[in-house]
Image (cartoon, rainbow, N blue to C red):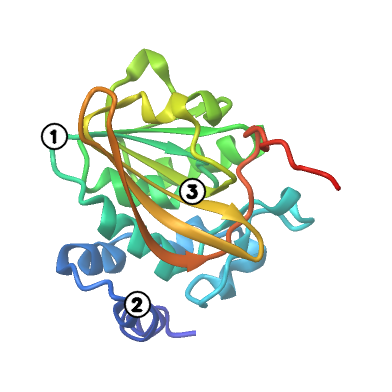
Amino acid sequence: MNIEQARFNMIEQQIRPWEVLDQGVLDLLGLVRREDFVPPAYRALAFVDMQVPLREHGARGQCMLEPKVEARLLQELQLRRGEKALEVGAGSGHMAALLAHQAQHVHTLEIVPELAAMARDHLRRAAVRNVTVREADGARGLVGEAPFDAIVLSGSVAEVPQALLDQLKVGGRLVGIVGDEPVMRAVLVRRVGERDFARVELFDTVAPRLLGFDEPPRFRF
C-alpha cells in the first residue's frame, strides 16, 4: 500500500467532502501518522472510512472513530494554543495526539487498562510530550485539573453528564456524540455563563458507548 497516497485520498475523498475545510485541521491530519495509532492487526484499515477495532476480540466495542468524524469534531472544537483540553476515552491515543498539536496540554482518560497502556506507548513513540494519559473513569472528569477550555468525548453517551459541563471554563467547549442507536448526534456545547450552556447539533452518526457512563432509566410498558 502506498501510505502517502492513502493518506492523501483519506483527506481529499473522505474528510474534505464532510465539510472539514479548516486548512489547519487538514494539514494536521497529514502530519499525525494515523497508521501508527492503529493496532497491528488492523493496520490495513488505517485510512478506511470505518471505525477501527482497538483489540482483536472486540474490546467491548472500543474503537477508533472514522477519520471524518474525528476531523469534524476537531474542527468544531476550534482549539487554540495556550488552551488546556480533556479527552474522555483515550483509546489508541490518536485523538489526543491531534489535540496535542493544537493545545498547550491534553489530559486524556481511559477506563480500560490495556487501552491506557496502548495510548501511552503510541504517544511516546510519536514523541508527543504534552499529553497525560490517566487510567480513570471519564464520567467524573478530572476535577483536580479543571477548568478546561475544551472537552472531547471520543465515543457516545446517552446524555452529557453535568459533572463534565461543570468542568468547562466560561467560553469553553465540549464536543461529543449523544443519543441512542439507531440515531445519535454529534453536539457542540459551549459554556456561555456560570450556569448557562448553549448546545448546537452538528451531524448524525453512531459511535460505541464510552464505558463507565450511567445509562438514564428507561420506561417499560
**Callout 3 crowding tier (Cα within 10 Å): few <14, some 14–19, many ≥20:** many
Task: State the SS at label 1.
Answer: loop
Query: Which is nearer the N-term, disc 2 or disc 1?
Result: 2
Whether 49 is drawn above or below 24: the answer is below
Q: Amino acid at mark 2?
A: Trp
Q: Which residue is mark 1?
A: 82
Q: Amino acid at mark 1?
A: Gly
Counting from the top left corner in percent of width and height, residue 163 is at: 45, 24
Q: Which residue is mark 2?
A: 18
Q: Amino acid at mark 3?
A: Ser
Rounded to the nearest angstrom, the CA distance separating label 2 from label 1 is: 28 Å
Task: State the SS at label 2.
Answer: helix
Query: Could you tell whether 80 is left or right of 139 in the image?
Result: left
**Callout 1 crowding tier (Cα within 10 Å): few <14, some 14–19, many ≥20:** few
Q: Quadrant of residue 127?
A: top left
Counting from the top left corner in percent of width and height, residue 190 is at: 27, 41
Query: Could you tell whether 181 is left or right of 178 in the image?
Result: right
Whether 108 is drawn above or below 187: the answer is above
